[in-house]
């Protein structure tokens, strides 16, 4: 940060000192201004002692301070009842049955966590009841990101029932609004579509409980006044850090005002809050850009690398996974033989996938074994420590697949504890993938899940990676542990318990890297990712489909989180598959024993190039999306090192077409770059006209280059390296 002291002065000047009652202050002193480097959120405590939003967006936006606020349409976190008639952010039934809430200002405070991050707390109280809501806003100045959540508590004479508990509900004022959402299903994750909002309510939600993102992700792009463009226009990005059921509601009124109501889905989840307890909503993350959605994405990426994911600066290993090679049909010698292939192509780590556990009920098929987490004595007589040691002998690290939240009925665990599974009384259990979900609200089940993780990792210090899977969602949300009047707590408390386990894993095993997976991309959010290093985007690894998926994911998640593996799916050219995978966290899912010597050489050369030249730029650099796969026959993107000393350009020909000029972005206009096409076939030289030439960044970005790709599945990787 260039001026950290100035930032603190601005914060301290704009956040007025705490007070109670109604002091004789000026209108200006009632302002609450929360700035970041290029955006600002401005709130106002009006004469009625409620908190209203005046603006969120441009720092140069002129703010007019109202002498009076006629209506409550712009209330910042509006409660239900007592005059508010739109969708509320907070809805509570008080202990005496009163169904309305009236939140008024009590005090506010600001804390400078460091020279980049500040935390503003605005405490509200019901005007009659001892019912409290604290609005919490954490500002990340350099990253232009605002994190918001709410803390709800009370001191009434009995439980208060919460029906709505939004994390954030900002208001926008513009001529038009364009919403981009990210939807999908199994093997079709994170597809992107944009639509113009009209008066009424548009709702994006999930009711799946424990793997909320299977059908859509709790993330969106909101462009005002015009459809979203990559490099220009006022654009907001929002994403909810929650792995459970969510609701994103966009209500446009007859005055063209838009409210975005974001948080846990209240459907079937009313929550009885006991006196003295605090209900903390998940964090909602916002960023704003005047330079289009490209800058929105770079804001999220820069924030995530520092604050949102585990070990953001740590290189992600090149992983070889055995699933495509063996499925569940393997033994000890087979797995050891695969280590040799991993070493041969230069991979960093071997990940043993599903099928390694279960004895009374061996994990031979998806129908058995899940929940009995002892290594199968027939398949792996010497256990996981032996495999991990054998991998280490070949200078390859070892990782293990787990699905600790789940159970097959055909297991010793279910035989002994059928009551630990989520399900409804008097209903035939509904299996999905032949399994049920363990009830993590039950303390014994929660501790069992933790012990699975602890036991697995503690048996060998050579286990340095895990893939945490979750292959079904909840269809019968019932708990034999929760009281009858607390059944609606299940889908909320499950995720709080899940995060507690994940947090314990990250704390006790800081050297075990972790990938989150959920039947593909069913659990991709910053609620889970704070405990993980990467995620599995989809079981669809066809590189053509991955281009579209990774394009969508890149709007919110940095490349080092997106596990991108080379496979045989789709039967695409191998070099094309490698070039696609290198634009994320490169890995391989192939039976390397069956590859030809030429194919192994191509894999090894690609991995070597990635590790030595590209990994740091891709995983730590700024992303510029150049040509969308949704809009033409070619997709392209480049990553630029933070210091702009290097860049890499990826080009993918999805359909045959005549080459046209492509202009890279993000380069330093004044520095000179040497252009070099890489990952070429052996003994072939580049046909790129400017290959080997030195040009300044301004010329490259102005005039561009003409790729030689023209046939379907042609691809190019081009490096730019500064010479000065």
Image (cartoon, rainbow, N blue to C red):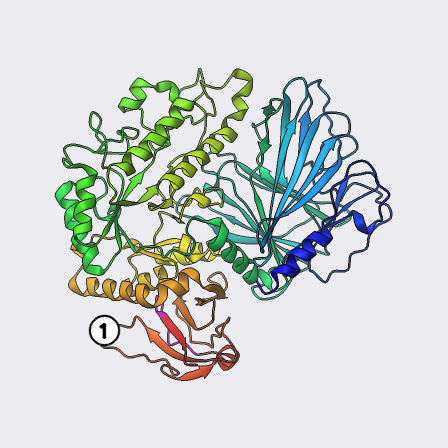
For disc 1, the marked residue is 682
**Residue 256 versus residue 369: which sits nearer the camera?**
369
- The percent position of residue 233, horizontal first and vertical second, equals 64, 63
Res. 406 in view: no
Q: Which residues are magenta?
A: 706-716
Res. 404 in view: yes
Residue 230 among those drawn in magenta: no
- The percent position of residue 211, horizontal first and vertical second, equals 45, 38
Q: Residue at x 73, y 22 (%)?
A: 98
| 591, above or below 613, in the image | above
| 452, above or below 547, in the image | above
Q: Quadrant of residue 588?
A: bottom left
Q: Residue at x 48, y 39 (%)?
A: 243
513 sits to left or right of 423? left
Quarter of the picture holding the C terminus: bottom left
For the view shown, which residue lies furthest in the front direction?
Answer: 5
- The percent position of residue 570, horizontal first and vertical second, equals 31, 55
Q: Quadrant of residue 342?
A: bottom left
| 272, above or below 212, in the image | above
Q: Secondary structure at mark 1?
A: loop
Q: Residue at x 33, y 30 (%)?
A: 451
373 sits to left or right of 480? left
209 sits to left or right of 120? left
**Residue 551 versus residue 136: which sits nearer the camera?**
136
């Amino acid at each position: 940060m260039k001026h950290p002291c100035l930032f603190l002065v601005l914060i301290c000047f704009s956040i007025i000192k705490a007070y109670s009652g109604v002091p004789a202050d000026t209108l200006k002193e009632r302002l609450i201004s929360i700035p970041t480097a290029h955006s600002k959120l401005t709130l106002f405590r009006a004469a009625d002692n409620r908190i209203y939003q005046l603006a969120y967006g441009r720092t140069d936006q002129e703010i007019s301070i109202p002498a009076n606020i006629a209506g409550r349409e712009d209330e910042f976190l509006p409660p239900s009842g007592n005059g508010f008639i739109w969708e509320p952010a907070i809805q509570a039934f008080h202990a005496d049955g009163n169904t309305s809430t009236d939140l008024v200002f009590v005090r506010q405070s600001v804390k400078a966590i460091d020279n980049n991050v500040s935390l503003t707390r605005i405490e509200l109280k019901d005007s009659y009841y001892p019912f409290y809501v604290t609005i919490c806003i954490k500002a990340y100045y350099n990253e232009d990101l605002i994190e918001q959540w709410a803390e709800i508590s009370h001191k009434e004479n009995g439980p208060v029932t919460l029906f709505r508990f939004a994390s954030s509900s900002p208001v926008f004022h513009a001529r038009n609004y364009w919403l981009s959402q990210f939807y999908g299903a199994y093997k079709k994750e994170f597809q992107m579509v944009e639509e113009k909002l009209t008066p009424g309510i548009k709702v994006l939600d999930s009711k799946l409980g424990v793997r909320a993102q299977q059908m859509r992700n709790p993330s969106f792009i909101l462009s005002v006044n015009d459809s979203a463009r990559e490099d220009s226009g006022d654009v907001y990005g929002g994403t909810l850090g929650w792995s459970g059921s969510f609701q994103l509601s966009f209500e446009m009124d007859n005055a063209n005002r838009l409210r975005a109501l974001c948080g846990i889905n209240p459907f079937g989840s009313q929550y009885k809050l006991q006196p003295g307890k605090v209900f903390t909503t998940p964090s909602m993350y916002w960023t704003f850009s005047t330079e289009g959605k490209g800058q929105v994405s770079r804001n999220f990426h820069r924030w995530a690398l520092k604050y949102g994911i585990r070990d953001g600066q740590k290189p992600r290993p090149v992983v070889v996974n055995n699933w495509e090679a063996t499925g569940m049909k393997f033994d000890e010698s087979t797995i050891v033989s695969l280590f040799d292939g991993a070493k041969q192509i230069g991979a960093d780590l071997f990940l043993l996938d599903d099928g390694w556990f279960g004895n009374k009920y061996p994990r031979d098929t998806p129908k058995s074994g899940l929940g009995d987490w002892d290594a199968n004595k027939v398949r792996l007589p010497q256990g996981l420590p032996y495999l991990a040691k054998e991998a280490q002998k070949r200078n390859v690290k070892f990782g293990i697949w787990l699905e600790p939240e789940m159970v097959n009925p055909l297991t010793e665990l279910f035989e002994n504890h059928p009551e630990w599974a989520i399900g409804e009384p008097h209903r035939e259990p509904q299996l999905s993938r032949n399994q049920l979900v363990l009830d993590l609200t039950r303390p014994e089940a929660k501790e069992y899940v933790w012990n699975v993780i602890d036991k697995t990792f503690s048996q060998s210090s050579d286990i340095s990676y895990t893939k945490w899977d979750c292959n079904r969602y909840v269809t019968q949300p019932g708990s034999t542990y929760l009281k009858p009047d607390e059944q609606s707590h299940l889908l909320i408390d499950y995720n709080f318990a899940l995060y507690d386990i994940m947090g314990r894993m990250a704390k006790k095993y800081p050297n075990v890297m972790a990938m989150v997976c959920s039947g593909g991309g069913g659990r991709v959010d910053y609620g889970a990712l704070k405990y993980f290093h990467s995620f599995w985007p989809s079981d669809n690894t066809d590189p053509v489909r991955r281009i579209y998926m990774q394009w969508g994911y890149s709007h919110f998640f940095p490349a080092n989180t997106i596990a991108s593996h080379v496979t045989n799916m789709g039967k695409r050219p191998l070099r094309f598959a490698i070039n696609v995978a290198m634009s994320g966290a490169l890995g391989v899912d192939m039976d390397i024993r069956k590859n030809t010597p030429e194919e192994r050489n191509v894999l090894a050369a690609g991995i070597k190039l990635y590790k030595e030249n590209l990994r740091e730029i891709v995983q730590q650099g700024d992303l510029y999306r150049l040509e969308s796969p949704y809009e033409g026959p070619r997709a392209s993107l480049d990553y630029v090192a933070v210091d702009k000393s290097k860049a890499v350009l990826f080009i993918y020909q999805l359909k045959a077409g005549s080459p046209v000029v492509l202009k890279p972005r993000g380069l330093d206009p004044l520095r000179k770059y040497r252009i070099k096409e890489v990952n070429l076939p052996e003994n072939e030289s580049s046909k790129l006209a400017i290959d080997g030439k030195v040009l300044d960044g301004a010329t490259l970005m102005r005039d561009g280059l003409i790729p030689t790709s023209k046939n379907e599945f042609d691809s190019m990787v081009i490096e730019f390296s500064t010479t000065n």
